[in-house]
């Protein structure tokens, strides 16, 4: 009986290691896709706010007191 099992025994773990790497790579790809989808939606919202502000003729869609609260004036402007 040991003679029949001998050809099926392997001392190399390269096959199982390759499968483990493939599983880890698959999980990383899934995480990256999810992250890109969330970032894409957030980026789309930012660009929509900017486009809305430009269409309304305002210089800055950001509320006063926030980032860019200078009212859209160029630096050094006295207007």
Image (spheres, rainbow, N blue to C red):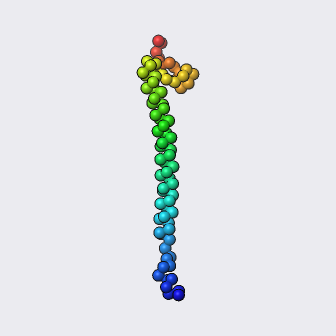
Q: Residue furthest right?
A: 65
The structure residue drawn at horizontal position 46% and vertical position 15%, both measured from the top left corner, is 77
Image quadrant where residue 55 sits: top left
Q: Identify whether 21 is placed above or below 66.
A: below
Q: Please indicate, yes or no, whether residue 43 appears anywhere in the rendered image.
A: yes
Q: Residue furthest top?
A: 79
The structure residue drawn at horizontal position 49% and vertical position 51%, both measured from the top left corner, is 30
The structure residue drawn at horizontal position 49% and vertical position 39%, both measured from the top left corner, is 39
Q: Identify whether 41 is placed above or below 67.
A: below
Q: Identify whether 8 is placed above or below 16.
A: below
Q: Position of residue 69 (x, y in %)?
A: 53, 21
Q: Position of residue 14 (x, y in %)?
A: 47, 69
Q: Position of residue 13 (x, y in %)?
A: 50, 71
Viewer-nearest residue: 25 or 71 = 25
Q: Identify whether 36 is placed above or below 1.
A: above
Q: Please indicate, yes or no, whether residue 75 appears anywhere in the rendered image.
A: no
The structure residue drawn at horizontal position 56% and vertical position 24%, both measured from the top left corner, is 66
Tally the marks.
Answer: 0
């Amino acid at each position: 009986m040991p003679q029949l099992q001998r050809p099926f025994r392997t001392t190399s773990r390269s096959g199982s290691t390759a499968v483990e790497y493939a599983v880890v790579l698959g999980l990383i790809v899934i995480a990256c896709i999810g992250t890109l989808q969330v970032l894409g939606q957030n980026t789309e919202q930012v660009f929509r706010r900017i486009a809305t502000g430009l269409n309304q003729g305002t210089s800055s869609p950001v509320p006063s007191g926030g980032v860019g609260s200078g009212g859209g004036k160029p630096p050094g402007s006295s207007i």
